[in-house]
Amino acid sequence: MFKITKDIIKKVYFPRPVDSHKYDRGLLLVIGGGQFYTGAPALSAMAALRAGVDMAQVLAPKRAADIIASFSPNLAAYPLQGDWLDMEDVPSLLSFTKAAQQTAGAKTAVVIGGGLGRTEETKKAVNEYLQQIRTKLVIDADGLHAVAIQKDLLKGKNYILTPNLFEFFILTGKKIDEFSFEDKIQAVKDEAQKLGCIILLKGAKDIISDGQEVAIDESGTPYMAIGGTGDTLAGICGSLLAQDIEPFLAAQAGSYINGKAGEAAAKKFGQGMVATDLVEEIANVIKF
């Protein structure tokens, strides 16, 4: 077990060559959103851009995509049909993923789950999409509820899973709220090994494990206990995956960057801090 320090930044960020081209630092697809939670995929995409990915594309049901497109000219948002993700959208998701891989090659990654909702049809669509793709992936929020019913989709994929305590229970069947910190560490390690994925358990201290090693991130602040900071975390992790950082290291760095950006935002805004404040601090955290 080891603690994450500021040295993690130097392990994932390097000066860009003078002959750099777009997509050298990756292309990220963010799949999320619905009738109600329109901001989740937008926050992931904005955080991903601030964390250095060259392009972030949002795929969301029409209402969410139309709203997201108005947030910033930096965001590309494609409207899926209907009020929520369903099986009819899977061909579009696959088409965008294939196109991204043709454009950026190995520097392609996906973040899926934020704001999707938990209808049975949405869960089925998420799992059908995962069944057919081969790419680097962060699964967050409602995406975790989907894969919890078909965990064989995770085995050996080295995906990054970003549950809170409740989502960890949904995913694993283990209720660890009252566990000691040491027992939580062991539970995360055991489940990461069983699933064949990276688990980043969110909390006052994040616990990250690949099933073999465990990293602890003590960055962050109680002011981050607000809506949206989990979405920014998923976006940062996805950004690093797209930049070709290996998953366990990407999860560690994503946790640290998100926490430190939250600390900086909290110093400025205190009780009034919101998730977009965190996004604006990411660039300062990753300076070297």
Image (cartoon, rainbow, N blue to C red):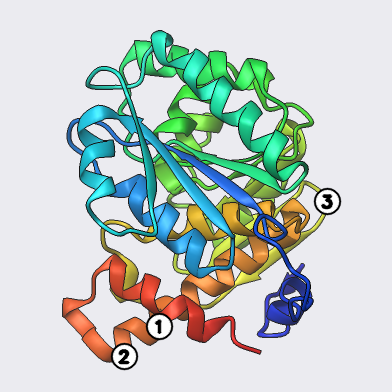
Of the pair 5 and 178, the residue shown nearer to us: 5
Mark 3 and mark 2 in contact (Cβ < 8 Å)? no
Q: What residue type is labelled 2?
A: Lys
In the visual, does 214 lie left or right of 239? right
Q: Residue at x 50, y 59 (%)?
A: 48
Of mark 2 and mark 3, the one earlier in the sequence is 3
The picture places residue 105, in percent across and down from the top left corner, at 76, 41
User: Element type at marker 1?
Assistant: helix
Vertical position of residue 100 compared to residue 276: above or below: above
What residue is pinned by disc 1?
263
Of the residues shown, which amino acid type is indicated by label 3?
Gln
Q: Going by the image, does 161 lie left or right of 142?
A: right
Name the kind of residue labelled 1 in the image: Glu
User: Which is nearer the N-term, disc 3 or disc 1?
Assistant: 3
Look at the numbered discs 2 and 1 and tell me whether their residues touch, using CB distance below 8 Å: yes
Q: In which quarter of the image is residue 237?
A: bottom right
Q: Nearer the viewer, mark 2 or mark 3?
A: 2
Disc 3 target residue:
212
Residue that badge 2 annotates: 267
* Residue located at (37% from left, 18% from top): 122
